[in-house]
Amino acid sequence: MSLAQLVDLRKVYRMGADVEVVALRSINLTIDEGQYLAIMGPSGSGKSTILNLVGCLDRPSGGRYILGGQDVSGLSDGELSEVRGRRIGFVFQSFNLIPQLTALDNIEVPLFYQRMHRRERRRRAQELAERVGLGPRARHKPAELSGGEQQRVAIARALANDPLIILADEPTGNLDSRTGQEILAIFDDLSSRGRTLIIVTHDESVGRRTHSIVRVADGVVVGHEKN
C-alpha cells in the first residue's frame, strides 16, 4: 500500500536576484507502507533535500508530494509543522537533543506539543526508553550519555508520536562501528515490526541492510535496487 508519493518533485534554491541552484530536477518515487528504504548518492546529489521534503521541513518548488493521501506540497508553514508533529519521526546524525532535559524528558517533547496528559507522556516515554535499551540511563542528561545512548534517545523520541514515516539522516555517522551496528539493529527491529523507515546514508553496508536503495545524482534518481 502506497504511503507517500513524490511526483515530478523539484527544488530550486534562489541565492540572490540572478543566482539559482537546482537541487532536485524531477524526482518520482513511491514509498510503500512498511518499506525500509536507503537513499544514497555523493555529496550535493540531492539526497538530503529529498529527506527535507519528505519530512515536511521544506516545500518543493514544483511537483507534488502526497503523504498519507494528503497533498502537502502547498501547505503553509503552520500546516507543515502540524503534519511533521503528527506524521513524521526524525533521527539526525547529531542527535539534536535538548541538553537541559533528561533522556525521558527529551522523548516526551513531541508528546508535549501534541498536548498529551503528563502522566500518559511519562508512561509512553518510559515504555519507549525500555524498547530502545536505555534502561537506567533514561534519567540522565545528554552530556552524561554516550553517543550510542544519545542516538537511542533520538530514536525513542522519533517513535513517540507513532509516526507514519521515520526519517534518519546518517544516523550512524557520529558513532564508532560497534555502536553503529547496535543502532542499525534497532532500525532492523523496527522494520520487522512494520515501521516505514527512510535512511539517507553514504555507507554501502548500511544501505544493504534495507529493502531497497534509491541512488541519486545531480538531482535525479539514477537507480533503484532491491536488496
Image (cartoon, rainbow, N blue to C red):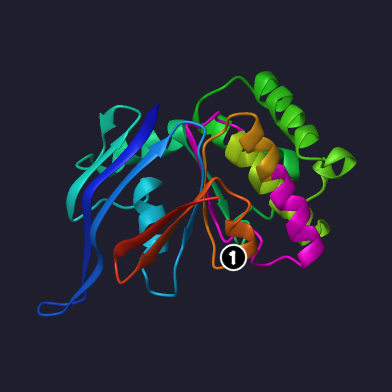
Q: How many numbered marks does the figure carry? A: 1
Res. 108 visible in picture: no
Q: Secondary structure at mark 1?
A: helix
Please check the rendered image and state whether residue 11 is part of the magenta-colored stretch, yes or no: no
Q: Viewed as shown, does residue 68 lie left or right of 17?
A: right
User: Which residue was labeled with disc 1?
Assistant: 204
Q: Nearer the viewer, residue 105 or 4?
A: 4
Residue lying farthest to the right in this orientation? 136
Report whether 175 appears left or right of 11: right
Find residue 162 and report its horizontal and vertical position in percent: 55, 28
Q: Amino acid at mark 1?
A: Glu
Q: Quadrant of the N terminus?
A: top left
Give the residues in magenta: 160-186
Q: Residue at x 81, y 41 (%)?
A: 138
Which quadrant of the figure has residue 14?
A: bottom left
- Would you say residue 197 is visible in this rendering? yes
Please identify the residue farthest to the bottom as the structure is shown: 18
- Image coordinates of residue 11 in percent, x first then y, are 23, 60
Say whether residue 149 is left or right of residue 169: right
Task: Tell me residue 131's x, y (percent).
Answer: 76, 33
Residue for point 81% across, 56% down: 145
- The percent position of residue 207, horizontal first and vertical second, equals 57, 57
- The answer to if 163 sits in the magenta stretch is yes
Front-most of residues 44 and 120? 44
